[in-house]
Image (cartoon, coloured by chain):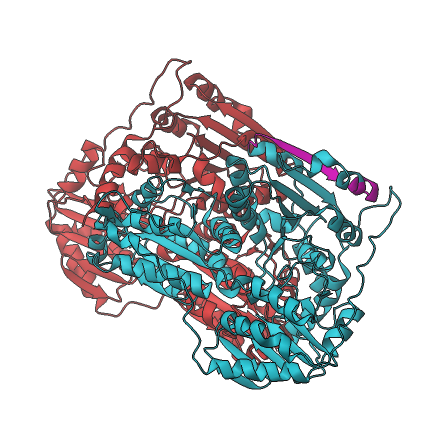
Chain colours: A cyan, B red
């Protein structure tokens, strides 16, 4: 992807975007602000690069997160103070959930900083470093550029760290530096994105794992969030194929292995797993856990209950075997080494367990009011290969666990950070990424009416870019159902102002769109069997009418556990 | 306002809200989240207190800011991590602009923190103090409660600091502490909100000022932001009455003295003032400057050009006379002392200058397309006593400077922090405050179509609470006009997706509403002469059609200066 740049010098602003373009980051998210305007000019100089122009900065951060989950890296541009602070919750989410995101902030010129001018967008106290400090805690690394001679190297380092560690990185870029020149020959050496090699001693760790494999008669593989985020899906598949072990995912690991894989046993969520899955995982005598992230909602409130101590954890920057931690042993390389040798270690008395059959979809009379159980049971039949499925914290993120994803599906959810409204922005990022990689892929959002209110204006960005590959399912249950289940079932703070959802696409001037409302089982069934509806040729808003306290069974169980944890002394 | 509480003990959650109720803070802004739900239960236990239930946390922070600018203090409740970070830009604005705001964050229980549980809404690293640290830099003080025996005192201290310093204060309240009991007798002693008295030496400072007054033959008074924020409007009026000096305001000081006052000379903005105002201020031989905040947009990019060194600055926590600073001398008390004695010091050769007449409103043919100059010229005639006028950063904040406010008008604008979208939230807070103090007062918003997109969903909160006293003027100039004037006149990053603004009130289910679009001078004139329209009995959306590069002359001048500052090396 590195091409010779025609001029001998290039502006620093363009340098930044050329570097991103080399990594196929071709949509830049954010909003204009007067400390970043000259930087935005440079986006337009790079062929095939586009400026998304989001509706607000938090939404832009969510969009960058969604884009990165598809393409491995993204870039968010905001303006000093007001813009960057608005984005922090979105950046914090990318930190918690391991998403590679370069946050570039247009800051006042070096001379304004030196003179401590009382500029707008400052706190009025002459402190120009305060926002940089605030971002520090939620960044893998940061750079506040001031010296043009080292600035390109700093940009390269920041991009590398964001990509390799899959975390946000902060870059402060003073307005006056955008047009300073740097040698364009620097662009000819690609940024080194390779992981550093594991130490030779890591080989011993792999030996130890192999030995555990050779002793196990009932082993399983458990796939979690970081297998997806740190780009180990291929290794997971190869490991399952090489061992023939049964494989499970966590909620955050869903889509970490193709759900058409014959060895996939289901989703493990501690006590909230199906009885078959619970038994299979907890009775295993060896668990190879890939990329685990043991948060409350990902583990049924910490209700894992393995009967074995033989747990091997593969992480992006360490491994753990039983109680021993091996810092610096990165899972990608370790998995590759394990895959090469594992088949010759498999215990001869290992008999591949039978994978349970998938549940049949529910049946209901056509006039029956729609329920969450019915929706999540039927939706699997409507999904198709290549879909990108985005589910909001709340009933959707829990409901989706029981659905089946066709092959090559990508699931996006924010199970750890759990910021409501995230998915509307993430859908924009995912849809714009899909336009770049394969416009025939559908991007399907499931969001509650409560969460939608936080970030609704980002639908306007979908309309602006004609993201006709999107389906927006709004689950209308008249308020914050997940909160009602946790606490305050009839409290009015869980109510919201009711909206006329089906007027949103018209409000935002979508060019091609369809509005549908479904209230009964029969209406849902006929929608899901409508071939025209299945074809992604316009933006679609589907309002799904549900009753106030209706929720997937696993959410009801989780909510009870959550309230207990919250109120414990 | 302190009444005896019927039970001998009260929960800590209710204690907090009873304290706020004693200070007439009767609307609490924010969103529910599972670490604050049990706290929100307590809002409903306090008679006449309401939970606003905003559409997102940034908007809620803006609303709390707007409410506080009317009532002197406000309270925002968010949830740990996701909720509080979303609010930071709004809280930062309150810090920069001196607005008293208590930010209460519902955090995980003490035991979850101690066990470092991998809870949702955390970064996944067991660090429960990181968000508290991030808020530190934009708070006057903070408290992270953990010991019930001192918690009421910490709450009292935080409320006092927020009020006295007119800054945000952060309180972390663990979910498990909400229901712990404290003695209700504590509620019988009101929180001490008095400023501490100035040291006796401050008397000398007042002497020195009096002497300067006695020597001046051409003195003026200049009123700025902090005179409003630190509750010195009455002192300003008395000072002007006692001296008969001509008085000017800055953009941020507008409405710091009644604009019907016969001694008001106009708005001083450095080189961007009217020639008469510029001459009067800059040729003064003594300037009594009250609450100055010399930010770029408040000073015409630092273009003050006094011909005198005799400048006396009154600030909330210090005074400055010529080059000498007097820390700890608070303006409120110093002004009161000065007012008592000043009339006997006035120089006999001081002849009160004539205040220039106000400009006549512009005239235009009825079919003439509407312009900013015409709008801002005519709008003064439509304003009425008691109006609360909220103007967004951009064309509105500049345009409003040339308008005339009737008596008892309150102006709200965010000239220093300048976060676009602020005013939509601030309007909600102001409208809810108006419902409490005098429902006949109108709340009038001027916002550009670009800024509106960032926070549009907050209009839903106006609809939910039937804020029928609101007028929402949307200045539709097809994008970010202020940014176009600064940089990128025809750059597409300053474009926005066009919306059908007149469908917003229907989308949000307003009960009583009116939609109007005005495109010509004649249409505006007939709207402004329509008596029915002037009566605040429904929510009104007025779409004002303007051309893309049309802007008030003072903004055009400011934009040129701003770009220069941004790009300077």
Which residue is more in the foreground, A287 or A353?
A353
- Asked if the magenta segment contains residue A513, the reply would be yes
Q: In this view, does B241 lie above or below A485?
A: above
For this view, does A250 lie left or right of residue B225? right
Residue at 36%, 45% in the rendered image? A33
Q: In which quarter of the image is residue A207?
A: bottom right
**Image location of residue A168, percent across then percent down:** 43, 61
- Asked if the magenta segment contains residue B110, the reply would be no
Which residue is more in the foreground, A143 or A194?
A194
For this view, does B371 lie left or right of residue B310? right
Q: In this view, does B208 lie above or below B9?
A: above
Residue at 18%, 43% in the rendered image? B303
**Image location of residue A485, percent across then percent down:** 72, 61
For this view, does A449 lie left or right of residue B157? right
Task: Look at the image and give the residue range highlighted in magenta.
Answer: A509-525
Total number of numbered discs in the rendering: 0
**Image location of residue B263, percent across then percent down:** 26, 38
Q: Is residue A539 visible?
A: yes
Q: Is residue B378 above or below residue A323?
A: above
Residue at 43%, 79% in the rendered image? A199
Farthest-out residue, right? A365
Residue at 53%, 53% in the rendered image? A70
For this view, does B163 lie left or right of residue A539? left
* Quadrant position of the N terminus of chain B in the picture: bottom right
Which residue is more in the foreground, A198 or A319?
A198
Q: In which quarter of the image is residue B327?
A: bottom left
């Amino acid at each position: 992807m590195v091409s010779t740049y025609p001029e001998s010098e290039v502006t620093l602003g363009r340098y930044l975007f050329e570097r991103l373009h080399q990594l196929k980051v071709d949509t830049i998210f954010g909003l204009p602000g007067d400390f970043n305007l000259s930087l935005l000019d440079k986006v337009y100089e790079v062929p095939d690069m586009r400026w998304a122009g989001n509706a607000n900065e938090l939404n832009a951060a969510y969009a960058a997160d969604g884009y990165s989950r598809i393409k491995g890296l993204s870039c968010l541009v905001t303006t000093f103070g007001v813009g960057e602070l608005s984005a922090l919750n979105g950046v914090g989410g990318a930190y918690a959930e391991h998403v590679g995101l370069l946050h570039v902030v247009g800051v006042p010129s070096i001379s304004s900083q030196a003179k401590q001018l009382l500029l707008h967008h400052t706190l009025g106290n002459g402190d120009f470093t305060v926002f940089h400090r605030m971002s520090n805690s939620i960044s893998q690394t940061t750079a506040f550029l001031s010296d043009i001679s080292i600035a390109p190297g700093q940009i390269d380092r920041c991009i590398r760290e964001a990509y390799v560690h899959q975390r946000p990185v902060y870059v402060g870029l003073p307005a006056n530096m955008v047009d300073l020149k740097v040698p364009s020959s620097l662009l000819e050496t690609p940024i080194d994105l390779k992981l550093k090699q594991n130490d030779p001693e890591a080989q011993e760790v792999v030996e130890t794992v192999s030995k555990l494999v050779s002793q196990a008669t009932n082993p399983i593989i458990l796939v979690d969030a970081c297998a997806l985020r740190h780009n180990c899906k291929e290794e997971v598949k190869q490991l399952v194929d090489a061992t023939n072990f049964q494989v499970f995912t966590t909620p955050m690991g869903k889509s970490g292995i193709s759900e058409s894989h014959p060895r996939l046993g289901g989703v493990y969520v501690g006590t909230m797993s199906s009885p078959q899955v619970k038994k299979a995982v907890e009775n295993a005598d060896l668990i190879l856990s890939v990329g685990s992230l043991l948060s409350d909602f990902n583990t049924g409130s910490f209700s894992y209950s393995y009967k074995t101590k033989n747990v091997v954890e593969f992480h992006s920057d360490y491994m753990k075997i039983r109680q021993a931690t091996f810092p610096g042993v990165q899972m990608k390389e370790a998995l590759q080494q394990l895959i090469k040798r594992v088949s010759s270690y498999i215990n001869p008395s290992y008999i591949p367990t039978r994978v349970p059959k998938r549940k049949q979809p529910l049946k209901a009379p056509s006039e029956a009011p729609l329920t969450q159980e019915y929706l999540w049971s039927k939706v699997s039949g409507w999904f198709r290969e290549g879909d990108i499925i985005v589910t909001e914290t709340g009933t959707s993120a829990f409901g989706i666990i029981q659905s089946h994803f066709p092959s090559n599906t990508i699931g996006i959810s924010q199970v750890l950070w759990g910021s409501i409204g995230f998915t509307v922005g993430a859908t924009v990022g995912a849809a714009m990424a899909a336009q770049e990689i394969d416009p025939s892929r559908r991007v399907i959002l499931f969001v509650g009416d409560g969460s939608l209110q936080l970030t609704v204006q980002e639908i306007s960005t979908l309309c602006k870019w004609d993201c006709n590959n999107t389906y927006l399912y709004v689950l209308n249950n008249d308020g914050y159902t997940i909160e009602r289940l946790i606490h305050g079932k009839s409290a009015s703070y869980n109510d919201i102002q009711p909206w006329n959802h089906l007027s949103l696409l018209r409000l935002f001037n979508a060019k091609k769109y369809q509005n549908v409302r479904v209230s009964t089982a029969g209406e849902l069934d006929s929608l899901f069997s409508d071939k025209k509806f299945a074809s992604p040729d316009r933006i679609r808003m589907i309002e799904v009418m549900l009753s106030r306290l209706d929720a997937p069974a696993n959410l009801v169980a989780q909510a009870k556990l959550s309230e207990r944890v919250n109120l414990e002394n």
